Amino acid sequence: MSQIDDHEQRLAAALARIAAAAERLAEPPPDAQVQRTEEPDSAAEVEVARLLRQLDEVQAENADLAARVGAVRDRQAATVATLEARIASLTQQIDSQGIEVQRLRMVNVQLREALRSLREALTEGAA
């Protein structure tokens, strides 16, 4: 995630530089610079070309990161689906074991009742 933050910061900085360059290009030149038309235009064009290359690079990195994030989301979705299926299976096992425990408790109560009856019968017969 730190790489994504780094790329986001770089992208924001590049966009800020592009916006600043675009504002400089949109501004009318002062009277002193009107006579020197060739040099400022070529410097501005070079700066714009550099910024556009930088923008293309950042957009390519952004597309790569978006693809990687998509792959991570797909893996997470698969993992979540697997875990949900496993939870459902384990819940079903717990439910069936709970039913079995309840049945064993009832059998245990019946065995105690039978044992108590046998003890009473034994004491009555022995007396």
Image (cartoon, rainbow, N blue to C red):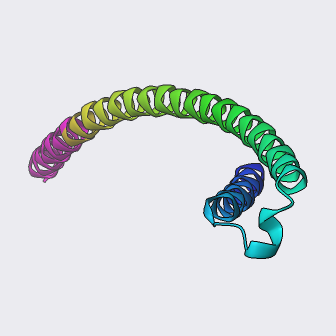
Residue 49 among those drawn in magenta: no
Foreground of the two, 89 or 94: 89
Going by the image, does 52 lie left or right of 127?
Answer: right
Which x, y percent locates residue 67? 62, 28
Q: Residue furthest front?
A: 35
Q: Main secondary structure of the magenta part?
A: helix
Q: Nearer the viewer, residue 82 or 34?
A: 34
Nearer to us in this view, 12 or 105: 12
The correct choice, above or below, for 57 with respect to 26 in the image is: above
Span colored in magenta: 103-127
Q: Is residue 40 left or right of residue 95?
A: right
Q: Quadrant of residue 75?
A: top right
Picture coordinates of residue 2, whole percent (x, y): 76, 56
Residue at 46%, 33% (x, y): give it: 83
The quarter of the image holding the C terminus is: bottom left
Residue 15 against residue 88 in the figure, above or below: below
Residue 43 drawn above or below residue 33: above
Q: Quadrant of residue 13?
A: bottom right
Q: Is residue 48 above or below residue 19?
A: above
Residue name at image x 63 percent, y 66 percent: 27
Query: Is residue 122 on the magenta stretch?
Result: yes
Viewer-nearest residue: 8 or 24 = 24
Point 77% across, 50% down: residue: 3
Q: Would residue 95 be found to the left or right of residue 87 on screen?
A: left
The mark total stands at 0
Percent x, y of residue 93: 34, 30
Left or right: residue 17 versus residue 126 is right
